[in-house]
Amino acid sequence: MGNHSVVWWKDSLSILGLLQGILIWVLMAYLLNLEVAWISFACGGLIGFFLWLTALGYQKPQVAKMTLWGIFFNALLSIFSAYLAFS
């Protein structure tokens, strides 16, 4: 087994980890409402957490790192929606 690292933008699992929370937020904002999309963090955070654990279990640190970035971006988008909803 070779230990070769692929750049993150060529790794489909890294892309999935990065975009999962963002896509959940976008879908909720589009299908429901921008002000309601703040709740996407509950879903995106939980799904991201389990993707992160899976990446760690399979010893894929790059995927785990990109998943944490995806959770972070989902949190930022959710904070934006919460600001719109509650201000």
Image (cartoon, helix red, strand yellow):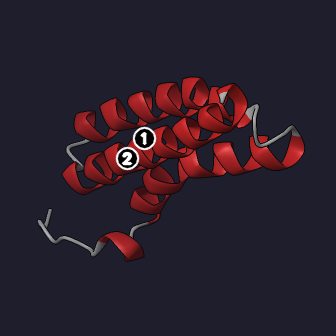
Q: How far apart, in angstroms, are the residues tagged by discs 1 and 2?
A: 6 Å
- Locate residue 20, reporting x and y percent: 55, 47
In the image, 47: left or right of 27? left
- Locate residue 34, reporting x and y percent: 77, 43
Q: Three-letter amino acid code at disc 2? A: Thr
Q: Are marks 1 and 2 in contact (CB under 8 Å)?
A: yes
Q: Is 7 located above or below residue 37 in the figure? A: below
Residue drawn 44% across and 55% down? 18
Q: Three-letter amino acid code at disc 1? A: Ile
- Locate residue 50, reporting x and y percent: 42, 28
In the image, 72: left or right of 6? right
Q: Quadrant of the C terminus?
A: top right
43 or 87: nearer the eye?
87
Q: Is 5 located above or below residue 71 in the figure? A: below
> Which marked residue is nearer to the observer: mark 1 or mark 2?
1
Residue drawn 33% across and 54% down? 66
In the image, 31: left or right of 79? right
Task: Check the image and name the residue furthest to the front.
Answer: 87
User: Which label sits on residue 71?
Assistant: 1
Task: Check the image and name the residue furthest to the right.
Answer: 31
Q: Which residue is mark 2?
A: 67
